Structures are given as C-alpha cells and as structure tokens.
Image: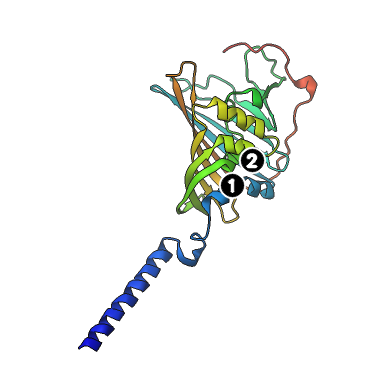
Amino acid sequence: MAERQHGRAGGTVVAAGLMACVCLSASGCGDSGEAAEDPVHTLHEAADALVDAKSSRARTSMEMATGGTRVTIRGEGVYDYTRRLGRLKVLLPQDPAGRVEHRPITELLAPGALFMKNRGAGVPADKWVRVETATLSDGNLVTGGATDPFAAAEVLRGTRTARFVGLTDLAGTEVRHYRGTADLKVAARTASEGGREALAAAAKGFATAVVPFDVFLDEEGRIRKVRHRFSFVNGHRENTVAVASTTLLYDFGTPADVRLPADEDIYAGRIAEE
C-alpha cells in the first residue's frame, strides 16, 4: 500500500511538473526566448533597428485633450533613418461643422530643424518656415502636430521600465507588444547627435520627463507602432494638456527621397498669429 501511494504521489508530482511546463509555454516563457529577453535592453536598441531598415512609410496621429476639448491631427509620409530626414503631409482637424479650415501642412523633418510649408498667415505659398527644434519647449515631439518618427524611436532609448505584454497581429504582421515608461533626460543623453538637444529641451519643457508608452516590434526588432503619452503645461500651471502621439511604420525599404529647401526658399519674415 505504501509503495502504491508513493507511486501515486510521484505521478502527481510529474503531472504538476508537466502542467507547469505547458503553462510556461503558453505564456511565452520557457525556451521561447521571452524569458531570457530583457525588454528594457530590447527597447533601447529599437531606434538602431530602424537605421538598419534604412527607410519606411509612416502614419502619425496626435490627439490633444484639455478640459472638454479634444482634437486629432493626422499625418502621412516617408522617412529616411540613415539620414534622419522625413517628409510628412499633416492634416489639421476639421471645424465643428466638418469643414477643413486649413490646407494640409507639408513638413520636412531633419536633425535639429523642422521645415513647414502652408504653416502661417502671411507666409508666401512657395516659401518654407524653418524652426530650430532645440528652441521648442517640447523638442518638436508635439509642436509640429506629428512626432518625428526617429525621435519617437529615440525616446525609447530612455526606457526605464518595460514589460512584455504579449504577441498580437498588426496589419497582418505578428508583433511583440511592450508597455513601459521612458525618461526623456536619459533618452537625451543616449540619443544620436542630431536628436540630443531636442530631447533635452523636451525633458525640461514637458510637465514631467517620464513618458508612458506602448510599442509593437516585429521579429527584426523594428518599431511597427509606438504610442507615447506626453503632458505639458499650456500657459498657467493648472492648464495641463494631455497628448497621445501614435506613429505607425510600414513598407520598410521604400524609397524616401527627401530634399531640404534651399536658403532662398526659406521665409525670413514675421509669421502672423492665426
């Protein structure tokens, strides 16, 4: 009887062990690679994976909320990660009647600079407005109505906490979903040379340097989707604006011929307030 009970107990231990292995495998642990992965380290390298990809198409969406007002600005274009140059057409929100009040803004993104066409009243139609991103309190993570895709990736260089949420499908591609927080001060110290000053300005200008995010990486470690939640003070300290910026990247390797305007095509006059 004792021997039979011992065998039964041993079988229970074996069964429990098998069940644990099944549970670990189903949750993406065990030998799947997720257990050995350090999500923080993986996200620190996400921007480098984009450089390896050379270029892509991009879609952006920026939702701003303050008080009871919420607006959404959308953009679409291409980005060259090796040269850190991008071109986006940004669509401003409609008025309450559903009419578009402004023409689309064409934006050229470059290290340390943002060029905009159709940006301000009184600017000739064939001229560009140039803004030094390091002079902006948000480092152009918000001002342009679209977060520079490479800047969005470099924010992740400041990842402090992150966890693997799970596998999911994004436009037919299996991606890994991570959730965490990044510190803009850390990101500024480890960013590429062209992005350090802008991220440092954002670290000082936002209400907090800590940025919550959700990011989705493909099997090559490239960002397919990243959503940041920024917060900044508009005027008085009690008027805090919440911004959710989403960047979608796809069609990697697509041609991205971005040419910056010549000096004579840049408007040097005063931009009227709209």
Q: Residue at x 66, y 30 (%)?
A: 197
The image position of residue 180, as x and y in percent, is: 48, 44
Mark 1 or mark 2, which is nearer the start of the sequence? 1
Where, quadrant-wise, is the C terminus in this rendering?
top right
Q: Amino acid at mark 1?
A: His
> Can residue 259 be seen by looking at this rendering?
yes
Q: Tally the numbered discs.
A: 2
> Secondary structure beneath disc 2?
helix
In the image, residue 164 sits, relative to residue 67, either above or below, namely below
Q: Residue at x 65, y 26 (%)?
A: 134
> Secondary structure beneath disc 1?
helix
> Which residue has dot 1 on it?
44
Label 1 near label 2: C-beta < 8 Å?
yes
| Residue 95 falls left or right of residue 143 | left
The image position of residue 24, as x and y in percent, is: 41, 64
In the image, residue 38 sits, relative to residue 140, either above or below, namely below
The Cα–Cα distance between marks 2 and 1, rounded to whole angstroms, is 9 Å
The image position of residue 200, as x and y in percent, is: 61, 30
Q: Which mark is residue 190?
A: 2
Of residue 104 and residue 158, the one placed in the foreground of this image is 158
Q: Amino acid at mark 2?
A: Thr
> Can residue 172 be seen by looking at this rendering?
no
Of residue 90 and residue 62, the one placed in the foreground of this image is 62
Image quadrant in which you'd find residue 262: top right
Single out the mark in the foreground, 2 or 1.
2
Where, quadrant-wise, is the N terminus in this rendering?
bottom left
Q: Which residue is at the far left?
A: 1
The image position of residue 63, as x and y in percent, is: 48, 30
Image quadrant in which you'd find residue 20: bottom left
Q: How is the image coloured?
A: rainbow
